[in-house]
Each structure stands twice: as structure tokens, then as C-alpha cells.
Amino acid sequence: MRLDRRPVGPGVAHFLRRRSSLPAWMDLAWRVGAIFVLITIVLAIHWIDRDGLKDNLDNHISFIDVLYFTTVTVTTVGYGDIVPVSPQTRLFETFIVTPIRLFVWLIFLGTAYNFFLRNTFYRWRMARIQKALDKHIVVAGFGTSNSEAVRELIARGHDPHSIVVIDGNETALAEAEALGCNILCGDATRDKTLADVRIDRACSLIVSAGRDDSSILITLTARHLAPDVPISIVVRNEDNELPARQAGATTVINPVSFAGLLLAGSCSGHHIADYMADLAAAGGGVKLSERAVLPDEIGKPLQSVTTGIALRIYRNESPIGYWEEAAKILQAGDQIVEIVPGANGKPHARP
């Protein structure tokens, strides 16, 4: 599992990698075995060439002396009680034992990092990031729909560090990481995964797992962990729209149905589909915006709104059109949906 923020800039090389097929105990055994083989090689050569060694204590080199000298010289630079005296032994110590010593230390350090330091650092870093997560957006799945959603969120001004992407595919996660998002490799249908990304403190959850059943299960899991978080879900089968809402989804989007609406609209006028796409994109001339009613707007009609072209009110989750009688008086708690100028647009005159 990984929750991390790491900038990836242009020109950074991406390497093909996959998870090691060796279990942790076998990886550790391989490292220990490599050290044992290296020490055995040095021990054998020291024993064969023991006449090139001198014991400053008793002037006698036994097998125990050779074993002691080998372990000391492989792991340290020695203590000086036993020293090489012949030229060939000194050359062996210089050109063979010294590189082996460095290699053994690299194995020791690599083992310590892989099995101890990395896990400790990971837990510390993950705890820091988790502590900072608040009012963030959780994205479950990073396929075509959600990757476009994340790019659109960033284009609309959302800080990538306030977005957490969950996916089990490392390639998809690398793409999300390159955008600057937090990433977590895991299964979003599990309680622990969603708890790790602090779903209870999120401001919204976007779900597009690639399969309707998986997306609905993620929604169910998230809803019981965070009863109040808004959940937007993508379903591809019209029959699954109702189960998605029953699972707790706040917004259910069917891309097939939406595409059908655009196609049908284009038959009535070729500018309609363009305008609808313009509304949906952050870089368009206009965009849709939702906000709470302002205190100075309460009691006034919806048509008096000056921040944009007001289209609809949501009052107690019920939609009210601008033409309806209830839209003549704005009330506290109303949510206003309006058209406002986009990044490349200018204020629209009211039609």
C-alpha cells in the first residue's frame, strides 16, 4: 500500500518494473546466503595463503585465527592483532577483500532499509499525509472517466495535493502521481483502504471502478464509513442507476445516457452539443457553478441574482426551476445552480 506525494517532472525516466515474486523470507534468505558465500570464499583463500598472515600475539596461525581474521576484515578494517605480511596477501586484501567488504556492507544496509527503515519511514510519512488530509477529494479508480475528472478538477483550481487517488494498477497510479495527487495502491471496496484516506473527513468521493458492481460496493463501503460525504458514481448500465442511489450515491452519472443527450441535442442544432460541452469544461467560455444562497439574496427572486445566469434552486434536495413560483423568493439553505463566465469567457447578457 502506498500513500505518497512525489513530483514527477518532464524528462524523468520511467522504468519498467513489477512486484517481486520472492516472498520476504526468501529475499532475506538470499541476502544472508550471499554474505555467507562471500565470507566463505575469503576464508578459503585466507586458509590456503595463511603463511602470508602474522599473529602478533603467538606467531601461530590456526584455523580459528583465519576464521577470526576473515570475519573481522570482511566486516571492518581489522584490529591489527593479525596482519597480512606477504605481498600477495596484501594485494588480495587490497583488490579482493576491500570490494567484498563494501559489497557486504551494501547488502547489510539494503536489508536494513528494505525490512526496517523503509517501513518505518513509510509509516511516518503516511501518518503525516493522513494528518493533513481534510476537506479533500477521494477518487476511487483512475480509468478514463476519473482521470479526466481529476484533470478537470486541477484545471478548475483544485490543489492536486487535496486529491487522493485509489487504484490497484501501478501504471494508473503513476499517471495520477505525475499530476501531483496523493496516491494509494489498494482496494477501495475495503473499509481499511477508505479509512486510510480519511474518507470521513473528505469533502467528496468520486467513484468509477470500471465495473458497476465494484463501483456500487465502493459506494456502500464509503457510505457506512462517512454518512454525510457527497458521492458521485459512474455507472454504465441504466439498470444500475437505482441500485447506485440506494447504495448511497448522491450523484449518479451514466456516460452512455449523457452521450445520447448530446447526440440528440445536436440534431436540433449543431451548436447545442458544443455549448453543453463548453459548460462542462473548465477551459470553456462558460461553466456551471453551484453555490449556497448569499445572505443579501434571501427574500429576493432567483432572477435577481447578479453573479451569473441563475437556472435552478435546490431546496431540501428538490429542484426548482427559475420559472416556478417557488423561485420568486430565495430562502436560507437554498443551493443555486448558475452559469458563470469560464476561464476564457466573458459575462453573458441575460437572454
Image (spheres, rainbow, N blue to C red):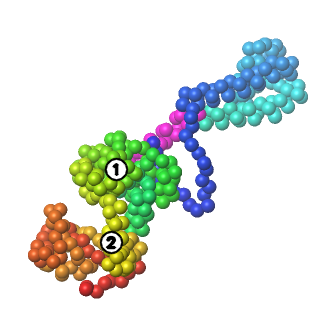
Majority secondary structure of magenta residues: helix
Residue that carries the numbered disc 1 in the rendered image? 212
Name above or below for residue 266 compared with residue 47.
Answer: below
| 116 inside magenta stretch | yes
193 with respect to 33 (left or right): left
Q: Name the residue at 11% across, 73% down.
A: 326
28 with respect to 228 (left or right): right
Place of residue 346 in the rendered image (x, y in percent of width and height, measured from the top left) = 36, 83
Place of residue 127 in the rendered image (x, y in percent of width and height, measured from the top left) = 40, 45
Sequence order check: which comes first, mark 1 or mark 2? Answer: 1
Place of residue 91 in the rendered image (x, y in percent of width and height, measured from the top left) = 85, 31
| 42 inside magenta stretch | no
Residue that carries the numbered disc 2 in the rendered image? 264
Name above or below for residue 272 compared with residue 5.
Answer: below
- Identify the disc placed on residue 19: none
Q: Nearer the viewer, residue 307 or 214?
A: 214
Report crowding for label 1: few under 14, some 14 to 19, many 20 or more residues within 10 A (C-alpha): many
Q: Secondary structure at mark 2?
A: helix
* Quadrant of res 21: top right
12 with respect to 78 (left or right): left
Report crowding for label 2: few under 14, some 14 to 19, many 20 or more residues within 10 A (C-alpha): few
Q: Secondary structure at mark 1?
A: helix
Residue 112 can be seen in this image: no
Q: Name the residue at 25% across, 69% down.
A: 291
Calculate the distance from the C-alpha at mark 1 to the C-alpha at mark 2. Answer: 25 Å
Q: Name the residue at 48% across, 47% down.
A: 169
Place of residue 341 in the rendered image (x, y in percent of width and height, measured from the top left) = 34, 79
Amino acid type for the residue under numbered disc 2: Ala
The region drawn magenta spans: 111-131
Q: Name the residue at 81% across, 18% down.
A: 47
Q: Residue furthest toward the front?
A: 267
